[in-house]
Image (tube, helix red, strand yellow):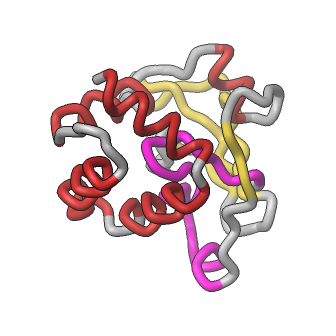
Amino acid sequence: MEQIKAFIEKAKSDSELMAKLDALGRKGAEGVVEVVSLGAEYGFTVTKEDMEAACRQNCPHHGELSEEDLDVVSGGSNKLLTQNRYDPNVCPNLTRTRYECVGFLRVLYCDHYKLSDSGKTHSGWATFFHVCAMGAFNYEGYEFGEPI
């Protein structure tokens, strides 16, 4: 797990590496093997299991965001690394939160993506408002973008 943490920290400060990870991230699950190879290329021993554990840690699939995390994503803090990830060829066609909004292992959020707690639950899970400031989407859904 320490290797994946170090790899993520390296990616945060290396725009070339982050661009490569973004390209792989857009591929989805098929990119796992390539991410492991890319980690090795940069001197890190990253395993598929490390990536799965990091994903669970950075983006658990259920449960509520902590107040601190919610504050960060909604724009109240600078803890998260953000950048203008808006792609005029992709984003106008989005109807919900996608990789372009949150980046590799949810460590590089788009400046235009805002998440806020709706204060409601649906089927026992907390719901959130997902908004793209560029107008791509504005809906209520679960924490990781699944619409209700």
Q: Quadrant of the N terminus?
A: top left
**Up-down relation of residue 44 to residue 138 (above or below):** above
* Residue at the (18%, 57%) spot, across then down: 33
Q: Quadrant of residue 140?
A: top right
Of the pair 2 and 148, the residue shown nearer to us: 2
Image spot of residue 8 (x, y percent): 46, 38
**Up-down relation of residue 32 to residue 86 (above or below):** above
Q: Quadrant of residue 89?
A: bottom right
Is residue 142 among the parts visible in the rendering? no
* Residue at the (41%, 38%) spot, across then down: 7
- Left or right side of 118 for 125: left
* Residue at the (38%, 24%) spot, across then down: 57
Of the pair 8 and 92, the residue shown nearer to us: 8
Of the pair 81 and 69, the residue shown nearer to us: 81
**Up-down relation of residue 20 to residue 46 (above or below):** below
Q: Number of marks in the image? A: 0
Image spot of residue 100 (x, y percent): 55, 62
- Left or right side of 62 for 47: left
* Residue at the (56%, 67%) spot, across then down: 95
Q: Which residues are magenta?
A: 89-111
Of the pair 86 and 115, the residue shown nearer to us: 86
Is residue 77 among the parts visible in the rendering? yes
Image spot of residue 5 (x, y percent): 41, 28
**Up-down relation of residue 77 to residue 101 (above or below):** above
**Is 68 contained in the magenta span?**
no
- Left or right side of 95 for 119: right
View extreme (top): residue: 67
**Is 108 contained in the magenta span?**
yes
View extreme (bottom): residue: 89
Image spot of residue 91 (x, y percent): 63, 73
